[in-house]
Structures are given as C-alpha cells and as structure tokens.
Image (spheres, rainbow, N blue to C red):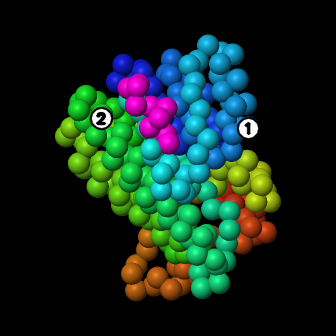
Amino acid sequence: MDLAKYGPWALIIGGSEGVGASFARQLAADGFKLVLVARKLRPLEELKAELDGEGAEIRIVSADLSQPDVLEKVREATDDVEVGLLVYNAGANNTRGLIVELPHEVPDSVIAINVHGQVNFSRHYGAMMVERGQGGIILTGSLGGYLGSPTLAAYCASKAFSRIYTEALWGEMQPLGVDVLHLNIGFTATPAMERLGMPIEFAETPDAVAREGLENITNGPLHIVSTPGNEDQVRRVGGPLDDRGALVKDNAIPPREETAQAAQQQAENAGKVG
C-alpha cells in the first residue's frame, strides 16, 4: 500500500477483529500509523498490543457506532493527525426478524451504522483528503445489498444504499485526487459470523478480503471479492425486473442453519469443490 499517497495515518472503523483486524495488520506492515475504532474495548486492546509489539503506532477508540456522537468521539483521536485512508468496515447484522415485529432499536442501529456512519465519516475525512489532493476511502458492503431478503430488510437496504452512495462518492472524488472503493464482501469467516453460529468452512478468509480491498482501491467504484461464486450470485440476483419475486424467493440470504449448505452449493456451482 502506498504510504506516501494514503498515509501516514489510516482510520479503520470496525477495526478490532475479522476483516478490520486484517486491514490493520496489513497496513501496519506497510508502515501506516493506525486509529482503530470498535465497540468492544478488549479486542481493540489485544490488537493494539500485538501491533505495538511489531513497532506500529496505534490509537484505539471504543465507541458505539450506532450513536449520533460517534464521529465527535473518534475525532478526539484524529484531529491532531493526518488521516489519508479511511476504511469503514463496520456493519454486521446480529438480529434477524420480521420488520413489523422487531423493536425499533434493531433497524435503527443497522441504519445508523451502515448509512449515517458511512456518510458522516466519509464526508468528514474525505473533505480533508480533498484539501490535500490525495487519499483513499474504502466502504465495505455485502452481496446482501443486491436483493431484499426477508427478515433482513433494514440490513439489505442499508447495504444497497452503501453501494449506490459509494458509486456517487467515487464520481465526485475521482477528479479531486481521492480514490474511493465499495468493497463488496460475501460470506467471510469472521468472529462475528462464528458468534452467530454460522458454519464457516466454505467462507472466505478475512486476510484475503482485506488484501483485495487494498489492492483494488484504485479500481473503483466497485470491487466484488473474488470468492468463487460471488460474481455469479450478483449476476443472478440482478436479473430481469419482471421476475423479481422469483429472485427474492430463490436467492434471499438463507437462515443461519442453512448457511453452510448454501455456501457449499455456491462453491460447487463455481467449481471450487467436487
């Protein structure tokens, strides 16, 4: 990763574990100084200790990304440094249910993190990158953003917003010297997925996802992680408008207990396994 263009500091939102931690390790190895933000303090402290031991300069911020004051809280750790790279990696969904039955806090939190958070953080740090005429922004999304899935209404809608928003942001920032990428992630072997009880034997590794994001930051506005079957799934669910009902029924994100079977089928369809 080009430290001169995207450094000296990188800000990773959702940077304590999984793909975020992989971004942190790879950027630290390239000489970046890091500000890591996540809700849980202990994983942040553990990752900081690991990277401190390797000679990296690390700041951590424990903050609830669904709260309206989160940007102000993060700015306390960044206003005195030059952030040349923003990676907004937060946005997993831990609660499924019918939208009419879920307490309002559930969709509100998903929308706050995936919509308001991406807009507010990219707007603030992107403005400073524009002033310097260089920098980079990676906003992570999901294959779930291509199709509405029952019991994941707010999540899928927020991921669709992220993709369209990033495309527009890329169009605005490209002439101003700032690279923008929507990193579209499929099923990935993260601790968050494990905590949900999802079998991850056919999932992509967080290291591979982060590596593809960093390697493709100049190839915006969109990069679909190259896990076998991901691009085929996007083509399948982005089909004819007159058949959307069938697409939703046949391709919606499956319940957790069916995830391994669906991932195996996707891998088999892509020729990954026999």
Residue 228 point in image, percent of width and height: 59, 52
Q: Main secondary structure of the magenta part?
A: helix
Amino acid type for the residue under numbered disc 1: Arg
Residue 137 point in image, percent of width and height: 39, 40
Residue at image x 34%, y 43%? 124
Marks 1 and 2 sit apart, C-alpha to C-alpha, by 31 Å
Residue linked to disc 1 = 42
Q: Is residue 76 magenta?
A: yes
Residue at image x 63%, y 47%? 39
Establish if 253 lies above or below 65.
below
Are circles 1 and 2 on residues that touch, CB within 8 Å? no
Counting residues from the start of the chain, the first of labels 1 and 2 encountered is 1
Residue at image x 58%, y 18%? 56
Residue linked to disc 2 = 128
Residue 149 point in image, percent of width and height: 57, 75
Residue 183 point in image, percent of width and height: 47, 48
Magenta segment: 73-82
- Tell me which corner region of the image, top left, top right, bottom left or bottom right, holds residue 78: top left
Viewer-side residue, 93 vs 104: 104
Helix, strand or loop for disc 2: helix
Looking at the image, can residue 22 be seen?
yes
